Amino acid sequence: MLKFLFSRIPEEIAQPKILLIDDDRDIRTITNLVLVTHGMGNVVEASAGREGVEAARTHRPDAILLDMRLPDLSGETVLQLLRADPWTRDIPVILFTAFAADLDRLLALGATDIVVKPFHPQRLCDVIGRALGSRSTGGVRVHVNAAVSKAAVSAITTGATA
């Protein structure tokens, strides 16, 4: 009986919901396309920090991709607001940014993971998959595009600034 009931759940309901908070429309479009084509779930978009916080409360996503540079609030502020709110504090937040110099500080804010732009589509999906699987705010891992130089990776992982 249960098998029958669950087999009739519409696909959009059964898939996880990902909130993407990024002010760059092109990044939102590409990321949405990547996530949908890789079967990562339904994507809800927000183009600013306040809009993202409200969307997180309204839609209760399974994971959040958060850009660090937004037009109204910094990504850090958005992350702090999400972590302070009982409705959103347990949602995994993956920082989605081209600027990730101080990983220790970002970890202390409660980031689940970090994906550095430009991103590799499969890596982004892997990170989201792990976040959805664990639903915890463990250690921060950095994922970078293979085109990023060794020096940049070293600077990112050691927290050094250029």
Image (cartoon, rainbow, N blue to C red):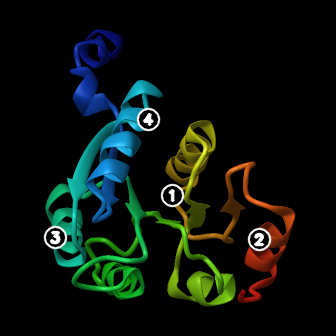
Q: Position of residue 102 (x, y in %)?
A: 65, 86
Give the number of the disc on residue 135: 1
Badge 3 is on which residue? 51
Q: Position of residue 107 (x, y in %)?
A: 61, 81
Q: Earlier in the sequence, mark 4 or mark 1?
A: 4
Relative horizontal placement of residue 10, taking residue 92 as reference (left or right): left
Quadrant of the rendered structure where residue 70 is? bottom left
Tag 3's secondary structure?
Answer: helix
Which amino acid is tagged 4? Val
Tag 2's secondary structure?
Answer: helix
Which amino acid is tagged 1? Arg
Mark 4 crowd level (few <14, some 14–19, many ≥20, 10 Å Cα): some
Which amino acid is tagged 3? Glu
Single out the mark in the foreground, 4 or 2: 2
Mark 2 crowd level (few <14, some 14–19, many ≥20, 10 Å Cα): some
Badge 4 is on which residue? 34
At horizontal 23% and vertical 49% (from top left) the residue drawn is 44
Which amino acid is tagged 2? Ala
Q: CA distance from mark 1 to mark 2?
A: 29 Å
Q: Is residue 38 above or below residue 139?
A: above
Closer to us: 41 or 147: 147
Relative horizontal placement of residue 146, taking residue 91 as reference (left or right): right
Q: CA distance from mark 2 to mark 3?
A: 32 Å
Q: CA distance from mark 3 to mark 1?
A: 23 Å
Closer to us: 151 or 137: 151
Badge 2 is on which residue? 152
